[in-house]
Image: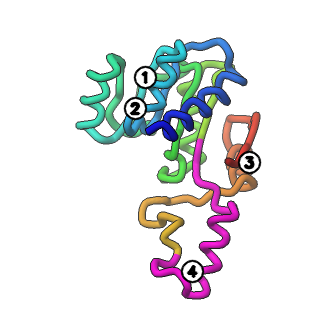
Amino acid sequence: GAKTDENYQYYLGRIERHKPSKGLLFDVGVGSGTMLETAARSGWAIEGLDVQPAQVEYLRKKLSCEIHLGLLENMDGAEARYDAVTLIHVLEHTLNPVEFLNKCAAVLKPGGLLYAVFPNTANLSDRLKDALSALGLKSRAYKHLAADHHLWFFTPAIARELVGKTKFRTLSVKTI
C-alpha cells in the first residue's frame, strides 16, 4: 500500500543522506521486495537474500536481479561486495545479532552503509501495552512483543550498545 511505499521511501532517503553515491544495495530478508523496488527506482543496482524459496524465485523474475536463497551467515563469496546493506525487520529474528552484524560488515565495501529497522520496545505504545498486560487488562497479554518469532528486543540504548560490540560505528539512531 501507499503507507508501505512511503516507509521505504523514507528508509531510502535516510540511506542516501549518508551514502549519496548510489551503488549496489543488498537487502537481507527481502520479503515482498518493496525495499529493492524502491532502491531500483532511485537508481541503485539491487540484490537480495531471503529464506523463502518460492518468494526468492518470484522476486528473481519480477525484479530481474539476483536474489540469494538462504541465511546471510551461510553466504560465501560476497565479501566487500555491497555499498549498502538493509535489514528491514530482520535483526530481531537473528540467532546472534553481533555475529550477524559482523557478517553484514564483511559483505560491505569499505565505507559501506548498514541500515537497520527494528521494533523499539521502549516506545510509549509498547510501554502502555506492557502495563496493561501486567495488570491483566489485555485479552492477549504481551502479544505486542511478538515473542513467538522475535528472538531479541531492542531499545535505542540497546541498539547503540549492540553496535559497539561490532565492526560498525553508529551514524544515527532514530525512533519513528
Identify which amino acid the numbered label 4 is placed on: Ser
Are dots 3 and 2 in contact, CB under 8 Å?
Answer: no
* Residue mark closest to the camera, 3 vs 2: 2
Residue 133: which numbered mark, if any?
A: 4
- Indicate the position of residue 96 as horizontal and vertical percent values: 53, 51
C-alpha span from label 4 to label 3: 28 Å
Range shown magenta: 117-141
Q: Could you classify mark 1 by the number of other residues whose Cα lies within 10 Å: few (under 14), some (14-19), or many (20 or more)?
A: many
User: What residue does disc 2 label?
Assistant: 33
C-alpha span from label 3 to label 1: 27 Å
Q: Which SS class for mark 4?
A: helix
Marked residue nearer the N-terminal end (3 or 2) = 2
Marked residue nearer the N-terminal end (4 or 3) = 4
User: What residue does disc 1 label?
Assistant: 47
Question: Where is 170 relative to 125, above or below?
Answer: above
Tally the numbered discs.
Answer: 4
Q: Which quadrant of the view contains residue 115?
A: top right
Q: Could you classify mark 4 by the number of other residues whose Cα lies within 10 Å: few (under 14), some (14-19), or many (20 or more)?
A: some
C-alpha span from label 3 to label 2: 28 Å
Marked residue nearer the N-terminal end (1 or 4) = 1
Marked residue nearer the N-terminal end (3 or 1) = 1
Quadrant the N terminus occupies:
top left
User: What residue does disc 3 label?
Assistant: 160
Q: Which SS class for mark 2?
A: loop
